[in-house]
Amino acid sequence: MSLSPSRHQPSPQVVKQAIQWSMRLNSASADPRLYRQCEQWRTEHPDHECAWQRIQALSSELSHSFQALPGSGAAFEALENSAQRLGRRRALKLLSGVAVLGSAAWVSRETVPWEQWQADFATHVGQRHSYQLQDGTRLQLNTDSAVDQHFTAQQRLITLMRGEILVACGADSQSPAPRPLRVQGRHGLFESIGGRFVVRQEQAKTRISVMEGSLVIRSPVSPPVQVKAGEHYSITPQHVALLQALDMDAAAWAEGLIVTKDMRLGDFLAEVGRYRRGYLGCADDIADLRLSGVFRLEDTDKLLAVLPQTLPVKLSYRTRWWVSLQRQA
């Protein structure tokens, strides 16, 4: 589904409707017809989709934070079941209260769930979504990402609040004097007249990968840097550095894939872990094993099940949220 977002906040009534749809679809009695009805409601007005995305992002962030706590699997299942019998407002209050009490790190992060709530576009863990912006730019959000859009007569600006985006932009179709498309991130401003590029923002660094066209990096720690197609750069508060060839395709996630070339197993599991909740890791003695291949993201459990077929490892599921790999005996 594509849309141009409403620049004002959805009304309380629309937000309430989005909450009600979310609760109905999360119930055990939800059927395919209900999903179709919800989809129809979401397409009736941009505010409906905006409210739906923010409800899903907030709910997912709360549940993800709680599930990451040690020993929380069974407790969270009980809370989920109880939440079905509560009003949505009370259920969110319950989940957020438990998460805050159980994890000081959750409340101290720079980007909190309420910031995602304010975003024009957001995805939760494991979700990817594509949008057509009002100027014709195609914007794709990877897992657990949030962006704001600021388009005026003078500028086209996308603010990356968290996560990773793929941007495909062309000539400005709405202004006689072409406005460059800019992406503002934590570590710099990235400007393109036309091209296709990925911006991946982490706490300590941002990575830029250009697939088509060109892009200019503007950072406080460096003169402007021109990035050409096929190049990758890392931007930190200390430097802007050209990267050698990556051990994975930077844009493959947009097609629902992880494509690796001689990638460390430890790094591969960290990448897969971005698309699922809970813990995913491996023993130190197998972290440096290497793998190359094409892996589909729609079911990460099936993806992990492939690994023992190609590497001397075995999977261990302590719970559905705690998966580890050890060396095969």
Image (cartoon, helix red, strand yellow):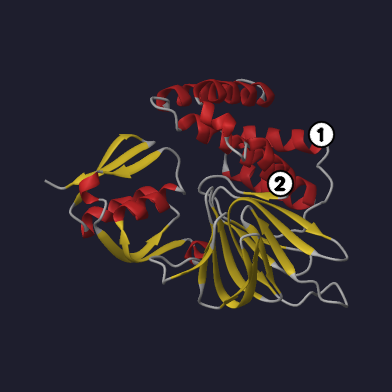
Q: Which residue is drawn at 83% across and 38% down?
A: 11
- Write down the residue under mark 1: 12
User: Which quarter shows the N terminus?
Assistant: bottom right
Which percent across, then down, holds residue 4? 77, 58
Residue 297 in view (yes/no): yes
- Write down the residue under mark 2: 119
Which percent across, then down, holds residue 147? 67, 52
Q: Which residue is drawn at 52% across and 33% down?
A: 65
Nearer to the camera, 41 or 3: 3
Q: On the picture, is 29 further left or further right than 321?
A: right
Nearer to the camera, 90 or 106: 106
Q: Which residue is drawn at 50% across and 48% down?
A: 126
Asked where in the image residue 5 lies, by quadrant, the reply is bottom right
Task: Tell me which amino acid carries mark 2.
Answer: Ala
Q: How many labels does the image show?
A: 2
Q: Name the front one of labels 1 and 2.
A: 2
Task: Tell me which amino acid carries mark 1.
Answer: Pro
Which percent across, then down, holds residue 116? 66, 42
Q: On the picture, is 292 further left or further right than 66?
A: left
Q: In this view, does 271 lie above or below 65?
A: below
Residue 1 in view (yes/no): no
View extreme (left): residue: 329
Q: Callout 1 environment at 10 Å: few (<14), some (14 to 19), or many (20+)?
A: few
